[in-house]
């Protein structure tokens, strides 16, 4: 039986980041493994393409990448964005009523960066193994916790650890095996993702329009193209995906209020259903959940992965501190401290994003009009705008 101090289940960006921080920052060596059945993302040295599967990483997440020792390798593929333009369909795209968050107003060089998920995952897993971590290519089957350890049954045998970290996504098998429950709510929406070439430059900006029937966002890419995330009803998504590329981009241009001029589809369209997930508890003895295993929010604010990375950072900090003090890294007191530190912040962000979706992206009537008035108020008051910029920075 393989014995570890910590086993992370799930080798996506959040799980891989937790693994790297645990191996790099521990003052005494920790035996850490990441359980991931999927192969490492294959990226050739001369592969310079940028696909549509990108994520918006906040400045706080960028600092975590620096701490994890991977930022220098990611920098050539990261595109910083200096501004965010946010407006409702009742507002003209280039008018003074558009809410603009500018990094310069906060004295920052940028608000964050756009990066491909595959490059972040590959860089983190490479650093994890280089730092002494064990990448275990096997699938999770079950777990059994005792007072001192937890045994994880995998497709390749049993692994014993003092702590198991579930970073295995919204359908977390670790969450189910540990007896932790989550409330799941479908938004009855689908997000369409695609690479788009634009007639006008993206101006190093993210552009987001609330449509009344959904949300449309353009994310700037390092090669001058953009990646769109277009959230619509499930029926509308089926209709849009059935259109020819020319028909699709004509509708896209109309829904963007012609913000970036003529648009051209640059690759295949993909789509994924949207849901909200909140786990009742983040921890149970010797098991902790992070990222999508414990919370899933609407993508309209681009905060999902950033919340997960902060989970990883806080848990890793508490665990390595306990280890340095020769405490049990899986002690329930350590895990409860993590839950207390993260749950309130995550739930506050969830409420805010859910409100934006209900009252700006899809709302109508008096409450929606009040929300639109709120956007204008934020735009006119520097202190309110600074608050929202700080949230974007993480």
Image (cartoon, rainbow, N blue to C red):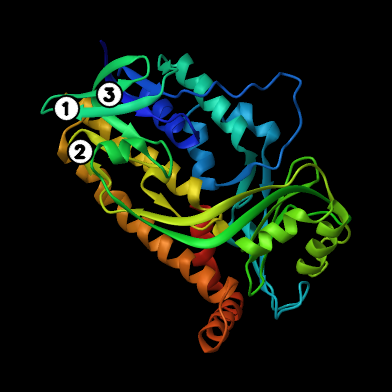
Q: Is residue 326 above or below residue 237?
A: above
Mark 2, residue position: 334
Mark 3, residue position: 152
Is the N terminus in the top left, top right, bottom left or bottom right quadrant?
top left
Mark 1, residue position: 328
Left or right placement of residue 126 versus residue 287 in this view: right
Identify the mark nearer the N-term, 3 or 1.
3
Front position in the image: 89 or 133: 89
- Identify the image quadrant of residue 54: top right
Assess whether mark 2 and mark 1 are in contact (beta carbons under 8 angstroms). yes
Front position in the image: 104 or 372: 372
Whole-percent x, y for residue 291 in the image:
41, 43
Could one spot residue 243 in this view of the protein?
yes
SS class, disc 1: loop
Q: Nearer the viewer's eye, disc 3 or disc 1?
A: 3
SS class, disc 2: helix
Mark 1 surroundings: few (<14), some (14-19) or many (≥20) residues within 10 A: some
């Amino acid at each position: 039986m393989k014995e570890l101090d910590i086993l992370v289940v799930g080798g996506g960006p959040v799980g891989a980041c937790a693994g790297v921080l645990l191996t790099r920052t521990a003052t005494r060596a920790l035996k850490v493994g990441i359980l991931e059945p999927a192969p490492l993302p294959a990226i050739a040295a001369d592969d310079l393409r940028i696909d549509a599967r990108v994520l918006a990483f906040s400045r706080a997440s960028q600092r975590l990448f620096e701490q994890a020792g991977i930022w220098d390798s990611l920098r050539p593929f990261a595109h910083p964005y200096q501004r965010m333009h946010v407006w409702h369909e009742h507002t003209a795209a280039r008018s003074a009523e558009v809410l603009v968050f500018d990094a310069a107003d906060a004295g920052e060089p940028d608000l964050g960066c756009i990066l491909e998920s595959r490059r972040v995952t590959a860089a983190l897993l490479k650093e994890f193994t280089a730092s002494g971590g064990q990448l275990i290519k096997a699938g999770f089957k079950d777990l059994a916790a005792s007072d001192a350890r937890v045994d994880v049954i995998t497709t390749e045998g049993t692994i014993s650890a003092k702590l198991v970290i579930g970073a295995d996504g919204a359908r977390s098998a670790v969450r189910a095996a540990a007896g932790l429950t989550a409330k799941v709510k479908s938004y009855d929406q689908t997000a369409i993702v695609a690479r788009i070439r634009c007639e006008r430059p993206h101006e190093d900006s993210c552009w987001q329009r609330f449509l009344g029937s959904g949300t449309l966002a353009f994310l700037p890419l390092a090669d001058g193209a953009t990646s769109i995330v277009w959230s619509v009803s499930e029926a509308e998504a089926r209709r849009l995906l059935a259109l020819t590329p020319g028909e699709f981009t004509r509708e896209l241009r109309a829904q963007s209020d012609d913000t970036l001029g003529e648009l051209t589809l640059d690759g295949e369209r993909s789509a994924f259903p949207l849901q909200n997930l909140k786990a009742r508890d983040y921890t149970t003895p010797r098991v902790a959940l992070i990222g999508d295993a414990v919370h899933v929010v609407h993508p309209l604010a681009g905060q999902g992965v950033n919340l997960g990375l902060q989970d990883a950072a806080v848990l890793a900090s508490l665990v390595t501190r306990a280890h340095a003090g020769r405490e049990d890294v899986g002690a329930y007191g350590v895990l409860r401290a993590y839950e207390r530190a993260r749950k309130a912040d995550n739930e506050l962000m969830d409420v805010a994003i859910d409100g934006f979706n209900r009252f700006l992206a899809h709302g109508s009537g008096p409450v929606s009009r009040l929300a639109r008035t709120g956007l204008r108020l934020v735009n006119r008051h520097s202190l309110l705008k600074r608050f929202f910029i700080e949230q974007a920075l993480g």
